[in-house]
Image (cartoon, rainbow, N blue to C red):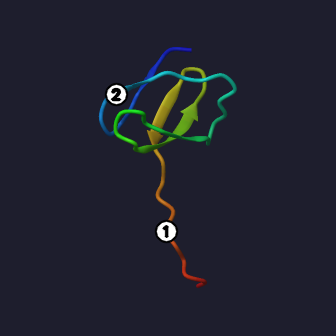
Amino acid sequence: MSDSECPECAGHIAPRPNLEVGEVLSCPDCGAKLEVKSVSPFQLAKAPSVDEDWGE
């Protein structure tokens, strides 16, 4: 697998073994939360933010 690029800061992120689609990673350069969209090829996208529903 080849590296992917952070959509926030354009930093390069190397895949680690046993990644799964939907897994959330942090960019080592900017700390952005990124979701694995594809394993082969390795692709990342900004992870959706989880809004608190405050029990509603």
Q: Is residue 27 above or below residue 12?
A: below
Residue 30 image position (x, y, % from top left): 34, 39
Q: Is residue 56 left or right of residue 6?
A: right
Task: Please report whichever mark, 2 or 1, sits nearer to the chain's N-terminal start.
Answer: 2
On the image, numbered disc 1 is attached to which residue?
51
Secondary structure beneath disc 1?
A: loop
Quarter of the image where one finds residue 31: top left
Residue 56 in the image, given as x and y percentages of width and height:
58, 85
In the image, is 53 to the left or to the right of 6?
right
Which mark identifies residue 4? none
Q: Tell me which residue sits at (60%, 23%) in the image.
A: 16
Alpha carbon separation for disc pair 2 and 1: 26 Å
Q: Amino acid at mark 2?
A: Gly
**Residue placed most toward the observer, 38 or 51:** 51
Q: Residues within 10 Å of mark 2 (few under 14, many from 20)?
A: some
Q: Disc 2 vs disc 1: which is toward the camera?
A: 2
Outermost residue on the top side: it is: 2
Q: Which residue is mark 2?
A: 11
Which kind of residue does numbered mark 1 sit on? Asp
Residue 2 on image: x %, y %: 50, 14
